[in-house]
Image (spheres, grey):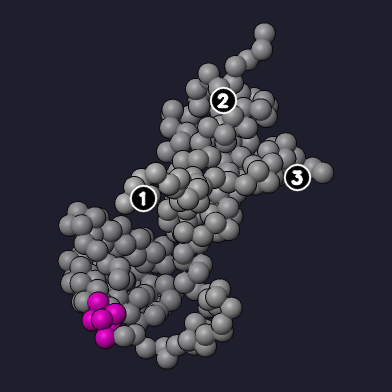
Amino acid sequence: MSKLYLNEPPKNNLEVPHPKKETIAFLLSYSKALVVNDYETFQFETVLN
Amino acid sequence: MKIKYTALSDADLVSAYIAGDEYSLSTLITRHKQRVYSFIYSKVFDRDITEDVFQDTFVKVIKTLKRGKYNEEGKFLPWVMRIAHNLVIDHFRKNNRMPKFEGNGDFNIFSVLNDGSLNAEKQIIKDQIEHDVRELIEELPDDQREVLVMRIYKDMSFKEIAFQTDVSINTALGRMRYALINLRKVIEKHNIVLTN
């Protein structure tokens, strides 16, 4: 019985889900690359390289 | 002077981001990524899908902010959560329309085939919903009910409806619009559930 309380819980049970670093990096790069241009009543989106 | 981004409020970070400060976005994402990601994961229970929906959520956030369409009311996180929620719904809608293969390696023919008929329980629910909708339609004013029945049940075009009811197409369209608005009002007022 003591085992139940003394053993370390498996790590994967405690893992809090979080987004991948690549996803965050993509979002930040996308944000930097995205340019919105206004022309009269229109808006154009351009993704720069 | 160096700005301490983590001490800034969401509203300040959003304003700074709109003004061109890219680092503000990084702070906003870092601050809220856990909540948004956990929320999506709690609905879809799949890491890859969560990742996609999370990414799409923030792509939408970025676009809206850059387009200057965001109304700052101090509700940045609820707004992001609403976007995530809508994208989760979109995901389930899309998934229901498309046949999917179960990912356990075994091909299951029943995941792409069905006999096109509803099972007994779903059929009963469907009949009940149709019955409820008909009763609701009966509550509509005559002119609106007439247009709605012709359009939905008789599948007539608005041109045909306009001709048959001796009104202009715009009037027929207007009646249809009010019929739907009124139906929605009654449904909301009485908390009627019309989904199975």
Residue at mark 3: chain: A
Q: Label 2 amino acid?
A: Leu
Magenta-highlighted stretch: main secondary structure? helix
Badge 3 and badge 2 both on one subunit: no
Q: Within 10 Å of the Cα at label 1, are there few (<14), some (14-19), or many (20+) other Cα atoms?
A: few
Badge 2 and badge 1 both on one subunit: no
Badge 3 and badge 1 both on one subunit: yes
Question: How far apart are labels 3 and 2 at the CA level?
Answer: 23 Å
The vertical placement of B54 against B165, above or below, is above
| Element marked by disc 2 | helix
Residue at the (21%, 76%) spot, across then down = B128
Residue at mark 1: chain: A
Residue at the (51%, 36%) spot, across then down = B32
Tag in front: 2 or 1: 1
Residue at the (36%, 50%) spot, across then down = A4
The vertical placement of B129 against B123, above or below, is above
Q: Label 3 amino acid?
A: Val
Q: Which residue is mark 1?
A: A4
Residue at mark 2: chain: B
Residue B125 shows in the view: yes
The region drawn magenta spans: B120-125
Query: In the rendered image, which quarter is residue B192 located in?
Result: bottom left
Q: Which residue is mark 3?
A: A47
Q: Of callouts 3 and 1, which one flags the residue occurring earlier in the amino acid sequence?
A: 1
Q: Label 1 amino acid?
A: Leu
